[in-house]
Amino acid sequence: MFVVALFSARGDDSATTTQSLDLGILVFGDQGTAEDGQMAVARSMRQFCDHNRCDLGLILGDNFYPTGVRGLDDEKFKLAFEIPYAPLVMPFYAVLGNHDYGFLWSRGDVDAQVNYTSKSLFWRMPFRYYNFVEKGIEFVALDTMPLARDAEQREWLESTLAASQPKHRVVFGHFPMLSGGQHGNDAYMLKNIAPKLCGKASAYVSGHDHDLQFLRLNCGLPQIVSGAAAKRRPVSQIRETEFAKSTLGFAYLALTTSGDLRVDYYDAELSLLASFPLPALSLDGEPK
């Protein structure tokens, strides 16, 4: 049984400390405005990392509003990524969101975001979808925008999930499966992707809705929504909701020295809003 813990504490006073962790991961999305909201949350994350372990970041899409980038030399890379996040001096593993593909009549250059990996010290997007391992956790990055028509990506996901049995696996993409936010549940993701992840992942992590949420699918799979790194919108509680907050902020994945994984939620004032343990996978791939 998982129990949410609610706190009101500064980041440097929380249970998250460098002494007790093997890995600390910032998790945020829908950040790419280069405006006040993004800069405020970026400052909060920098302050947080002054007192807590931060090894890498997961960026959940909508990296450059409103229509992605126009090419490798687009100034948005500097304004909406390098300026706010380079001071953290760590790698950021990113996925694409719907706005990165464009908006209305304007199309974004998603290949430029992939290719920017070779130009930036800190940006990581080796392909539209990819995986990597850090401290025994397998991270699986999805490009959810074309997923319904991308048979090659779906086949890759199935083979990736079958290829190893890590203790923890975190799958991340832009579109949520469940959400009490503006966009609501995603019928395609629930029908076609959730069954692949149930029993094969410690959590599915997404953005898209501009809020912070923790929900649990019927199969027990935890879902993290962290799309409030620049803007916030109202959020409601649905049947699967265990935590929901309309506030600027971010999530933080913490791997303890004892091998336990949890997610913490912080607002832009660095108040710890909620914390949930995430299940380890047994050797047969099922949650313990």
Image (cartoon, grey):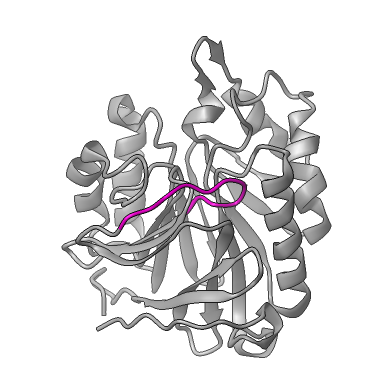
Q: Quadrant of the N terminus?
A: bottom left
Q: Position of residue 67 (x, y in %)?
A: 59, 23
Q: Quadrant of the C terminus?
A: bottom left
Q: Which residues are magenta?
A: 226-236
Residue in the picture at 64% in, 72% down: 270
Using the rendered view, name the quadrant where residue 4 is placed. Answer: bottom left
Q: Is residue 104 above or below residue 44?
A: above
Note whether residue 121 is visible.
no
Q: Position of residue 31 (x, y in %)?
A: 61, 44
Foreground residue, 144 or 283?
A: 144
Foreground residue, 227 or 191?
A: 227
Any magenta on residue 109? Answer: no
* Total count of labels: 0
Residue in the picture at 78% in, 60% down: 88
Residue in the picture at 79% in, 23% down: 73
Residue in the picture at 61% in, 38% down: 63
State the residue lying farthest toward the front: 234
Determine whether, in the image, residue 133 is placed left or right of residue 286. Answer: right
Note whether residue 286 is visible.
yes
Determine whether, in the image, residue 224 is placed left or right of residue 79. Answer: left
Q: Is residue 147 above or below residue 25?
A: above
The dominant secondary structure in magenta is loop
State the residue lying farthest toward the top: 105
Using the rendered view, name the quadrant where residue 22 is placed. Answer: bottom right
Foreground residue, 195 or 286?
A: 195
Foreground residue, 138 or 253?
A: 253
Q: Position of residue 152 (x, y in %)?
A: 34, 30
Q: Position of residue 256 (x, y in %)?
A: 54, 84
